Image (cartoon, rainbow, N blue to C red):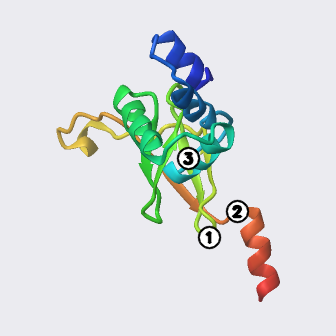
Amino acid sequence: MESLVARLRDREWRLTAQRRVIAEAMTGQHVHLTADEVFERARAALPEVSRATVYNTLHELVGMGELLEMTHADGRKRYDPNIEERHHHLVCVDCGRMLDVHADDPDLSDDQRHGFELLDIQVTFRARCPDCAREGATAS
C-alpha cells in the first residue's frame, strides 16, 4: 500500500509542514486513529500544529478521498488511510482496537438488492482482542 504522504505528493497537494506531519501520523498498518490521536502524534513531531489544522486537514483529506472516515461503535470518528485495498474491519468490543481484515467480499444477488445500485460494502466484525479476553479471564 502506498503511503498517504506519497499519494499526496503524487497529487501535487501542497504539503506544508503541518499537513506533512498530519499525513505522517497516518502511516503504518492497521491505522484507525481519532482526530485527537492524529493531533497528539502530529504535535509530537511539530509542537506548533493546532487542533483546528488537524481537524481541517482530516476533513479535506476525506473530501479528496484520501482517508476513509468511519464512526466507531463508541460514536467517535476514526480515520483510515487504507483506501487502495478493499477490506473489512475487526473491532474489539472492549478496548476499541481496530484491524484491517481481508476476507471474501460479501455480495448481494440481484433479487436481494431490491433494485438498489450497490456502491460499497463495509463489514465490521465485532470481537474481543486477546489482551481484553485475558483481562476478562483474570478478573473472574
Which quadrant of the view contains residue 27?
top right
The residue wearing badge 1 is 94
- In primary-sequence order, the first of circles 2 and 1 is 1
Residue furthest to the bottom in view is: 140
How many marks do you count on the picture?
Answer: 3
- Image quarter hosting the N terminus: top right
Q: Residue at x 58, y 22 (%)?
A: 5
Label 3 or label 1, whichever lies nearer to me, is 3
Q: Which residue is mark 3?
A: 39
Q: Amino acid at mark 3?
A: Phe
The mark nearer the N terminus, 2 or 3, is: 3
In space, the residues marked 2 and 1 are separated at their CA atoms by 8 Å
Residue lying farthest left?
115
Q: What residue is rendered at 66% in x and 66% in y?
A: 128
Q: Residues within 10 Å of mark 1 (few under 14, many from 20)?
A: some
* Badge 2 vs badge 1, beta-carbon distance below 8 Å: yes
The quadrant of the picture occupied by the C terminus is bottom right
- Tell me the kind of residue under disc 1: Asp
Dot 2 corresponds to which residue? 129
The reply to whether discs 2 and 3 touch (Cβ–Cβ < 8 Å) is no
Secondary structure, mark 2, is loop
Q: Amino acid at mark 2?
A: Cys
**Image quadrant assignment for residue 52:** top left
Q: Residues within 10 Å of mark 2 (few under 14, many from 20)?
A: some
Label 1 element class? loop
| Foreground residue among 43 and 125 | 43
Residue nearer the viewer, 136 or 67: 67
